[in-house]
Image: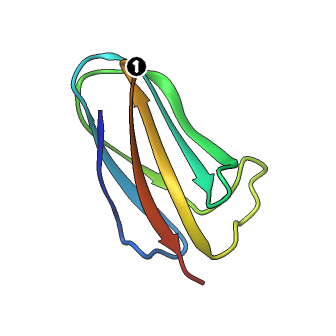
């Protein structure tokens, strides 16, 4: 699995995350802050192989707007992981 990109980057208030998975199966996409704390799980579902996109609205698991800073998108699928860095600027 691979996170190709997110755009725009830097972003405010939302960003689109483009990713691909090589085989059909469970896919999890989560957002982490610079301290390594999970901010929000964006996706945790079965998906077909291929290219996909999702949008993060800059909110945490409690639907609160997060602060400016660096965040990491973590894609997990098929026992493998891909991570991409993004910056939220207010």
**Residue 45, image x, y percentages:** 49, 23
Q: Quadrant of residue 65?
A: bottom right
Name the quadrant of the N terminus. top left
Q: Foreground residue, 78 or 6?
A: 78
Farthest residue, direction bottom: 90
Answer with left or right where residue 19 lies relative to residue 50.
Answer: right
Which residue in the protein does label 1 denote?
Answer: 79
Q: Is residue 49 left or right of residue 13?
A: left
Secondary structure of the residue carrying tag 1 is loop
Seen at 72% across and 47% down, the residue is 61
Count of numbered labels shown in the rendering: 1
Image coords of residue 11 (percent x, y): 46, 74
> Residue at the spot x=70%, y=66% of the render?
66
4 shown above or below 8: above
Q: Is residue 57 above or below residue 29?
A: below
Residue plotted at (40% across, 54% down): 84
Q: Where residue 80 appears, x then y in whole percent?
A: 37, 26
Q: Residues within 10 Å of mark 1 (few under 14, many from 20)?
A: few
């Amino acid at each position: 699995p691979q996170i190709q990109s997110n755009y725009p980057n830097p972003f405010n208030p939302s960003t689109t995350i483009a990713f691909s998975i090589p085989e059909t199966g469970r896919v999890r996409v989560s957002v982490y802050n610079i301290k390594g704390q999970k901010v929000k799980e964006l996706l945790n579902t079965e998906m077909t192989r291929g290219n996909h996109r999702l949008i993060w609205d800059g909110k945490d698991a409690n639907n609160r707007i997060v602060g400016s800073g660096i965040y990491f998108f973590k894609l997990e699928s098929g026992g493998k992981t891909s991570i991409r860095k993004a910056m939220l600027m207010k």
